[in-house]
Amino acid sequence: MTSGKIRWGILGPGSIAKSFAGGLAQSRTGELVALGARNPGKPGLAETFPGARILDGYDALLADEDVDAVYISIPHPGHAEWAIKAAEAGKHVLCEKPLALTAFEADAMMHAARIAGTFLGEAFMYRLHPQTLQLVELIKSGAIGEVRTIKSSFGFAMPGFMPEHRLYANELAGGGILDVGGYPVSMARLIAGAAAGKPFLEPDKVVGAGHL
C-alpha cells in the first residue's frame, strides 16, 4: 500500500455499490482502485465509479495484486461463494448484508477468513454509526431507565409485485426478512444486550406472521 490507504475493489456494480463508492471518495483511510463487473462494457461504469479500473469479471478483481480489500455487493446468493474466494485470494472482505443465506454458509465464510488470516465483515452500516454507539452508551448507563419493550420496524413501498425482482424472486433469496428484516432483529438484540450488559442477547422464542 504505497499511499497508506486501503485499496478497495468493488465486486458487482449495483446501486448499493454506487453508494459505497460515494462514501469511499470521502474516506481518509481508503480509496477505490478497481471494479469487477460481469459486463465491463456497460455504459456509465467509468462515470459512476471514477478512478476505478473496470475489470472483466469477479475473478479478475480477486486476481488483481493492487486490491487489498473487496466490497461484495452482488445479490444475496453469491455472497458466500465470492467471500470465500476472496479470502482464498488473500483479500479482506466487507460483505453486504445479509452475510449469508444460512448459518452453514456464514460458518464456511468465517472459516475461510480465519484460514487466510483476512478480515471478514458484514456491512450493517448502522452498527458502526456514532448515533448507535451513543444509544448503546445511554442504555448501559441507565439514562433512559429500565428497558421493558423494544419495538422496531423497517419497511418501504414497492410499485407492485415484480416476480423477477431480487426482492421477490426465490432464486435470488427474495423477501423482506433478508433484505430489511435483519435490521429490526439486529437492533432488538443489540438494545436487549446493552440493557443486560452484554454485546447482544439471543431470543428465548421467535414467532412470525406473514401476509401474502
Image: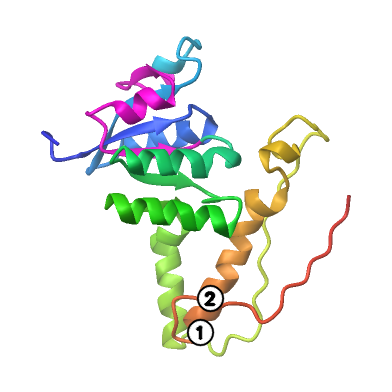
Find residue 192 and report its horizontal and vertical position in percent.
55, 79
Residue 123 visible in rendering: no
Colour option used: rainbow
* Quadrant housing the N terminus: top left
Residue 41 visible in rendering: yes
Local packing at callout 2 (Cα closer than 10 Å; few below 14, some 14-19, many 20+) is many
Magenta residues span 47-73
The residue at which mark 1 appears reads as: 195
Q: Mark 2 is on which residue type? A: Ile
Q: Are marks 2 and 1 in contact (CB under 8 Å)?
A: yes
- Which label belongs to residue 191? 2
Q: Mark 1 is on which residue type? A: Ala
Q: Residue visible at 55% across and 50% down? A: 100
For numbered disc 2, what is the local secondary structure?
Answer: helix
Q: Residue visible at 68% across and 35% down? A: 166
- Which label belongs to residue 137? none
Query: For residue 152, which quarter of the picture?
Result: bottom right
16 relative to 155, above or below: above
**212 lies left or right of 186:** right
For numbered disc 1, what is the local secondary structure?
Answer: helix
